[in-house]
Image (spheres, grey):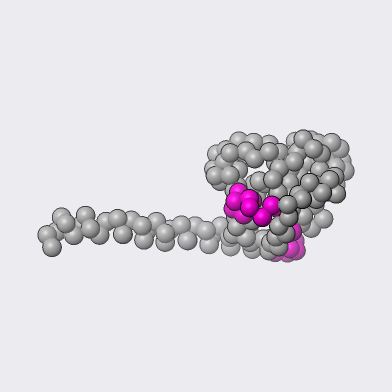
Amino acid sequence: MKPIKTVIAVTPAAALALGLASFGMTGMAHADSHSDMADHGTMHVTKTPTCGCCGAWVALAREEGYEVEVTDTRDVTTVKLDADIPGEMWACHTAMIDGYVVEGHMPFEALSKLLEDRPDITGIAVPGMPGGSPGMGNDPSARYDVIAFGGEAGEGEFFYQAGL
């Protein structure tokens, strides 16, 4: 085979292999940096069985080092009502970890802050489904607010801003 044809034939495969290798290393380094997340116990996530973005968020949580147990149900409303999540803060899935409620496509930096600071609140929420949030495109530059609720936060107060 002529040298130029060899380069043209091999380049796409080499680029794919390099990309996959670097993606794997990045993911491993990131997960290792959060290895203490398992110290907070199992995260219980309740979602609908057909929600792909919720499944994507769960996969990212596991990559971050969280131990995750999933309950699929068509009745997520009851879970939200039982957890006293204010209606304007509802999102597609609800998680419980270490005594806190975590609603929606939460950035893991905010979740870490919650578990480290241990404020006297019921939980934190990312209302709706903001584009770019984890599981919704996972764009680190996406900007949206995380709201605390219950306890000292009352009906809701600013907790964290993603994308800064």
Q: Is residue 151 above or below residue 60?
A: above
- Which residue is found at the position 71% from the left and 42% from the top? 91
Picture quadrant where residue 139 is located: top right
- Which residue is found at the position 78% from the left and 41% from the top? 148
Percent x, y of residue 60? 60, 55
Picture quadrant where residue 45 is located: bottom right
What segment carries the magenta color? Answer: 38-57
Percent x, y of residue 161? 66, 38
Q: Quadrant of the C terminus?
A: top right
Percent x, y of residue 157? 79, 35
Residue 45 sits inside the magenta stretch: yes
The answer to whether residue 72 is seen in the rendering is yes
As drawn, is 59 to the left or to the right of 96?
left
Q: Nearer the viewer, residue 157 or 71?
A: 71
As drawn, is 125 to the left or to the right of 78?
left
Q: Residue furthest front?
A: 74
The answer to whether residue 159 is seen in the rendering is no
Q: Nearer the viewer, residue 125 or 38?
A: 125
- Which residue is found at the position 60% from the left and 51% from the top? 52
As drawn, is 123 to the left or to the right of 15?
right
Query: How many numbered badges does the structure rendering display?
Result: 0
As drawn, is 75 to the left or to the right of 132?
right
Q: Quadrant of the N terminus?
A: bottom left
Residue 125 sits inside the magenta stretch: no
- Which residue is found at the position 75% from the left and 63% from the top? 41
Q: Is residue 13 above or below residue 142?
A: below
Q: Residue furthest left?
A: 2
Percent x, y of residue 7? 20, 57
